[in-house]
Each structure stands twice: as C-alpha cells, then as structure tokens.
C-alpha cells in the first residue's frame, strides 16, 4: 500500500484519541505522506472537508475511536472506496476495531502497511432513499443514505413515546404490518448490534444477507426474517400525520418521513473495506469477548480451550 495521502479522524472530545492522531500525523509526515486530520463526533463531520481538500487519491483512512466513530467513517468513506484502519482509542466496546495493543508500535504499523503485510475485510452496506408518488412510477425525494449496521424506521417525539404501524414489502410483495416501536433492516455486521438487542438473528459477516427485525412488536406472530441480499425492502408508515416517523442510519437521524413517503432499502453498491492487523482474527472469538457469549466457565483462545 502506498501512503502518499492519508486521512486521520479521531474521536471528538477525547484527549487520548487526539494525542494518538497527532503522533500518527507526525510520523506519516516524516515519511513524506500528506495528512488530513480532524475530529469526528455527533457535531463534527470532517469527511466532506477531507474529500474536497484531497489533492490526489486518498490511500488510507485511520479512524481512532469507538464503534460510533467507525460507523460514521464507514458511511462517508465506503462510497469512495477508501480502506479504513479502525483502532479502538477512547472507545468502549470496540466491536469493529483493531485492538489498541497492535497499534501502539505505530512505526511498525506503517511498515506493515507499506509492505502489504495485512488483510482486507470487506463488509456489506445498505443504502436507503425516500420515495413518493404512485407505486408504479415512484419519484425519489431524498438523497441516498448509507449504513454499515442498520437502517431503522421508528418514531421520535419530545413529549411521548409513540408506536408505529409499518407495512413492509419485499420485492413488491406485502409481507406484514408491524405495530410496535419500529423496524430494523440490518446487514450481517449490524446483526450483532441493535438487531441482536431486538432478538434478531446473528449473521456471519462473511455472508451477504439482509435481516428484517421488528422492535418490540405488539404481536406474538411478528418474527425477524432473513432475506437475500438482492432484495428490496420498502417500508410504509401508516397513520402518522404528525411527522413523528424518522429514518435512522446506524442510530443517527437521517431524515423525517412525510405522509405519503416511504423508505426503500437495498444492498449498497459499495462495501466498507477494513484493514485487519490481527493474524488470528476470529468472528466467533469477537462474539465471545465483546458480547460475553459462551458463559464464563471456559475460556477459549480461538479454537483452543485454555481453562
């Protein structure tokens, strides 16, 4: 990998993340690499400035933070095809990140990248748009929104907790009407996040599939479903005349859904590309460590029983 121009995004408001970002910038600049650096957070989105300021191809994005920081980066960088080195610096769970221990010798990390001694993990993403008008001749009424984890359609109100009635179509065929807190349309990556909390299926990220999971449905017959990656999921809010229903991407507000509009979700044409430094990466080990799966009686190191 060439390191001629690199993005460094650090978690906004976190001193440790910012300090490591500054260290990385100094080291890379000493290697004749141009660095674009800035904070990423709820009120900070540095990526449009990064992309517009780039004088040549961006070789790599280094994202230092927790999963929220990584998700924000993936939504912006995946459509541009920029690989991401995600490191848990100042984060909490760190489900999507490389361990901080592998990153502490940063000079060795740059040597590994320039020597192509790493793996690349590609993860499926979803895209969503709002449509309105006749079903046979729909008109797009929003930009494209991307997510790495999930699209969520649910209401939000300042002074009460409204429920939603959502009709779902898959490839033009009505599947069900859900009444409850909302609906999740998730990637395999997102199946271990909000979807798992809503009792949805866990899907290996090596698969391409879409999980549709109702959130707290008011029906015992409402169940999650897993559908092929080429499916198109249309979600119609019913009976909402107060503009409560919103579209959320990776738990961030994307847009309000006006009466007469619906959300169309499908697999995105782009994929998020993550640099993997670990030589023994295991999805199942990540489940055991991050989600505390398999109990606490026996500890495993990949496929080997330790105690």
Image (cartoon, rainbow, N blue to C red):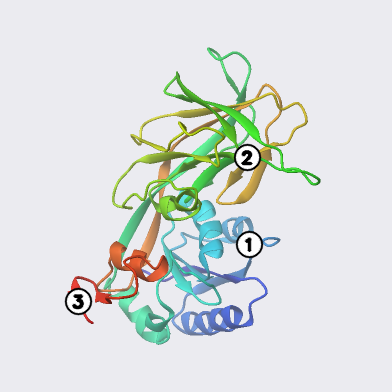
Q: Residue at the spot x=40%, y=72% of the render?
A: 98
**Pick the front one: 279 or 259:** 259
Quarter of the image containing the N terminus? bottom left
Residue bearing the label numbered 1: 46
Circle 2: element type: strand
> Would residue 95 appear left or right of 264 to someone viewing this image?
left
CA separation in Å, label 1 and label 2: 28 Å
In the depicted structure, whether residue 55 falls above or below residue 244: below
Residue bearing the label numbered 3: 305
> Would residue 227 appear left or right of 222 to someone viewing this image?
left
- Residue 15 drawn at (x, y percent): 63, 82
- The answer to whether marks 2 and 3 mark residues whose Cβ atoms lie closer than 8 Å is no
Q: Residue at the spot x=27%, y=75% of the render?
A: 298
Circle 3: element type: strand
Mark found first going from the N terminus, 1 or 2: 1
In the depicted structure, whether residue 210 falls above or below residue 72: above
Q: Residue at the spot x=44%, y=29% of the render?
A: 232
- Residue 19 drawn at (x, y percent): 59, 84
Q: Which label lies toward us, 1 or 2?
A: 2
CA separation in Å, label 2 and label 3: 43 Å
- Residue 51 drawn at (x, y percent): 57, 57
Residue bearing the label numbered 2: 154
Q: Which circle marks residue 247 in the picture? A: none
**Pick the front one: 45 or 98:** 98
CA separation in Å, label 1 and label 3: 44 Å
Q: Which label lies toward us, 2 or 3?
A: 3
**Marker count (numbered):** 3
- Residue 214 drawn at (x, y percent): 51, 38
Task: Let me know if residue 285 appears in the view.
Answer: yes
């Amino acid at each position: 990998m060439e390191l001629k121009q690199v993005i460094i995004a650090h978690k906004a408001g976190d001193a440790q993340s910012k300090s490591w970002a500054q260290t990385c910038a100094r080291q890379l600049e000493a290697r004749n690499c141009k660095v674009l650096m800035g904070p990423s957070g709820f009120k900070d989105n540095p990526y449009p400035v990064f992309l517009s300021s780039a004088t040549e191809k961006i070789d790599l994005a280094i994202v230092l933070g927790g999963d929220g920081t990584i998700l924000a980066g993936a939504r912006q960088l995946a459509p541009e095809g920029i690989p991401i080195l995600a490191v848990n610096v100042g984060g909490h769970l760190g489900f999507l990140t490389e361990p901080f221990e592998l990153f502490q010798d940063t000079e060795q990390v740059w040597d590994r990248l320039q020597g192509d001694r790493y793996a690349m993990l590609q993860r499926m993403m979803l895209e969503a748009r709002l449509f309105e008008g006749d079903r046979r001749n729909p008109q797009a009424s929003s930009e494209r929104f991307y997510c790495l984890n999930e699209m969520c359609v649910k209401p939000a109100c300042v002074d009460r907790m409204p429920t939603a009635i959502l009709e779902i179509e898959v490839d033009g065929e009505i599947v069900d009407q859900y009444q409850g807190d909302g609906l999740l349309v998730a990637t395999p990556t997102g199946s271990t996040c909000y979807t798992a909390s809503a009792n949805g299926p866990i899907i290996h990220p090596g698969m391409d599939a879409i999980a549709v999971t109702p959130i707290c449905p008011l029906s015992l017959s409402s169940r999650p479903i897993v559908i092929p990656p080429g499916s198109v999921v249309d979600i119609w809010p019913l009976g909402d005349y107060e503009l409560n229903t919103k579209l959320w991407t990776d738990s961030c507000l994307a847009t309000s859904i006006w009466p007469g509009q619906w959300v169309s979700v499908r697999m995105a044409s782009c994929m998020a590309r993550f640099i993997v430094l670990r030589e023994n990466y295991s999805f199942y080990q990540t489940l055991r460590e991050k989600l505390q799966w398999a109990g606490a009686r026996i500890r495993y190191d990949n496929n080997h029983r330790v105690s």
